[in-house]
Image (cartoon, rainbow, N blue to C red):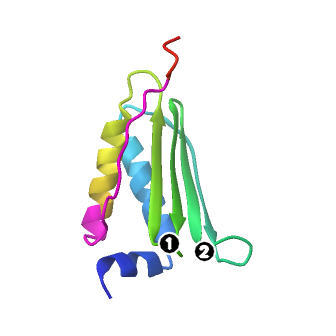
Amino acid sequence: MDYTEAFFEMSDAHEWVLSIMRAAVAQSPATEVHAHVVPFDGSTSPPGFAAVVLIDESHITAHHYADRGMLALDCFTCGDTDPGQIADYIHQGLMEGAPGLNAVRRDRVNRFLTGA
C-alpha cells in the first residue's frame, strides 16, 4: 500500500486534514471564525468528508472523494490575506504527512472578475 492509499484509508483523515487547514489559517493573517468537518460513510453520499474553516476573510474548504482518491481544496480570501500562502501551508502539511500524495492541479482566480 502506498502513502496515497494509506491516506484515503485513514479513519481519522478528516480530522487530520481539518487540523492542517486550521494550522494554515493560524499562521496567516486570517481570523478563524468557525471550523467543522463531516465524514461521509457512503450510506447516503459517496465516502469521504467535507471540511470548512470559516474565516473573517471568507473560507477554506476541503472535499474528500474516497471513491475517486481525490481531495479538493478551496482557499478563498478577501482583503490583504493571500490565499496562496494558506494553500502553500496546507500543501506542505499534506505532503509531510502523506508524501505519496500528488497535486494534480492548482489554479488562482481573481475574486472580482468584472473589475467592479
What percent of the width, then of the height, locates residue 75?
45, 42
What percent of the width, then of the height, locates residue 41?
64, 77
Which secondary structure is most common in the magenta stretch?
A: loop
Q: Residue furthest top?
A: 116
Q: Quadrant of residue 34?
A: top right
Magenta stretch bounds:
95-111
User: Which residue is found at the position 38% from the left and 36% from the top?
Assistant: 108
Earlier in the chain: of badge 2 and badge 1, it is 2
The residue pinned by badge 1 equals 68
The crowd level at tag 2 (other Cα within 10 Å; few <14, some 14-19, many 20+) is some
User: Which residue is found at the position 46% from the left and 31% from the top?
Assistant: 77
The residue pinned by badge 2 equals 47
Q: Quadrant of residue 43?
A: bottom right
The crowd level at tag 1 (other Cα within 10 Å; few <14, some 14-19, many 20+) is few
What's the residue type where badge 2 is placed?
A: Pro
Tell me the distance, in whole angstroms, between the alpha carbons under discs 2 and 1: 10 Å
